[in-house]
């Protein structure tokens, strides 16, 4: 059965999950047309859930690396064709809730392509936030999608696969840097990325996770490399101490981000020097560690991270 060519209704999930590639391709085209029409792209939560189940298995059916890469990019780009920000956020919510729900059913032969799909959607979500000029309400809503029940970084939802949270920790800051690079043009000056806001879901998960391994992964894969990168701007560009360089041989793995970031308010703060921003990020770590809902294990580790930085600053001052 052929899919409808009209953009007034989204293609049904059964067409997206068809075993026939031509049917799936046409359904994806209709999906893009539907969401690009600002007068027609509102969709209920129930319909979004059904739609995303179809999209998920549309990607499941894709084979051959080039086909998978093209489809992953095409699906993620739909986020940016949606002119209504609330609808775009609902589309992202549908993606994350479906991914969390279906993740444990992905076999080892397909897991790599879903890692790629997640990476593409992380990137497109950041480009959406950049397009919205890091509007605080939009950032807050997206963070809520990530940390509430059904989201991939929810600390209290036992259904969230640890492998998904680990993958996000591995790629999150890298994709933020990539999104900033991709969005930057000679004719457009981007507002600084609010790094503290971006990190909030991970800090909440690190504080409240019941799994020590999850905390360790967030610190080793996300916090340590980021803090090391911020260290590279100490004292007007001087090399950081050897102790600070223990996590990475590359002093600036996120060059675009480090040169254009702040803590929370891009308009009020403007670009913040990396060394100053590093201290503010660590202060945020300290503040979250102090919250009553933070687990004792995580509190000790977060305090230790903050104290080590203070000790390193004292060592650097003595050498000066």
Image (tube, grey):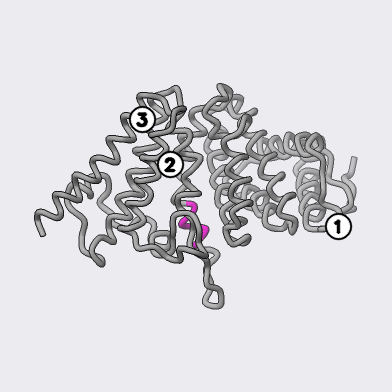
Secondary structure of the residue carrying tag 3 is helix
For the residues marked 3 and 2, what is the alpha-carbon distance in whole angstroms?
22 Å
> Where is residue 184 drawn, in percent x and y?
52, 68
Q: Is residue 178 within the magenta segment?
A: yes
Q: Nearest the camera: 164 or 265?
A: 265
In this view, 208 is above or below 175: above
**The magenta segment:** 175-180
**Rendered residue at 53%/39% (across/down):** 115
State left or right for residue 240 relative to residue 112: left
Front label number (3 vs 1): 3
Residue 152 location, quadrant: top right
Q: Quadrant of the N terminus?
A: top right
Mark toward the start of the polypeptide (3 vs 1): 1
Q: Nearer the viewer, residue 68 or 103?
A: 103
First of labels 3, 2 by sequence position: 2
The residue pinned by badge 1 equals 39
**Disc assigned to residue 170:** 2
Residue 318 lies in magenta, yes or no? no
Asked if residue 94 lies left or right of residue 113, the reply is right
Measure the C-alpha gap from mark 3 to mark 1: 49 Å
Q: Looking at the image, which residue is at 88% across and 47% down?
A: 9
Left or right for 63, reference 311: right
- Mark 2, secondary structure of its residue: helix
Question: Which is nearer the eye, 3 or 6?
Answer: 6
Give the mark, 2 or 1, whose residue is nearer the N terminus. Answer: 1
Q: Of the numbered discs in the image, which one, if any, rests on residue 299?
A: 3
Tell me the quadrant of the picture where the C terminus can be found: bottom left
User: Mark 2 against mark 1, which lies toward the viewer?
Assistant: 1
**Residue 26, image x and y in percent?**
80, 49
Give the class, few, some or many, for how many residues have Cα within 10 Å of label 3's Cα (few <14, many ≥20): many
């Amino acid at each position: 059965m052929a899919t409808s060519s009209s953009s007034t209704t989204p293609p049904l999930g059964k067409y997206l999950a068809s075993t026939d590639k031509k049917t799936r391709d046409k359904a994806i085209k209709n999906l893009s047309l539907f969401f690009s029409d600002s007068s027609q792209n509102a969709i209920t939560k129930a319909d979004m859930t059904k739609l995303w189940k179809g999209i998920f298995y549309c990607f499941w059916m894709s084979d051959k690396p080039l086909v998978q890469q093209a489809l992953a990019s095409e699906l993620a780009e739909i986020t940016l064709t949606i002119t209504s920000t609330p609808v775009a956020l609902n589309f992202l919510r549908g993606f994350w809730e479906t991914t969390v729900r279906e993740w444990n059913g992905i076999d080892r032969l397909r897991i790599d392509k879903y890692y790629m799909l997640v990476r593409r959607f992380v990137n497109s979500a950041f480009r959406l936030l950049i397009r919205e000029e890091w509007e605080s309400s939009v950032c807050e809503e997206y963070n809520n999608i990530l940390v509430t029940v059904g989201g991939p970084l929810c600390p209290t939802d036992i259904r969230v696969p640890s492998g998904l949270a680990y993958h996000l920790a591995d790629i999150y800051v890298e994709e933020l840097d990539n999104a900033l690079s991709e969005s930057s043009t000679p004719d457009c000056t981007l507002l600084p990325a609010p790094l503290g806001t971006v990190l909030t879901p991970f800090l909440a998960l690190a504080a409240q996770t019941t799994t020590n391994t999850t905390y360790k992964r967030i610190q080793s894969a996300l916090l340590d490399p980021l803090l090391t990168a911020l260290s590279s701007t100490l004292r007007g560009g001087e090399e950081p101490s050897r102790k600070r360089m223990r996590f990475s041989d590359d002093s600036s793995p996120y060059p675009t981000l480090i040169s254009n970031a702040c803590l929370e308010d891009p308009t009020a703060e403007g670009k913040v020097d990396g060394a100053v921003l590093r201290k503010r990020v660590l202060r945020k770590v300290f503040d979250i560690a102090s919250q009553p809902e933070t687990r004792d294990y995580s509190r000790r580790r977060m305090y230790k991270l903050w104290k080590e930085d203070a000790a390193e600053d004292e060592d650097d001052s003595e050498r000066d």
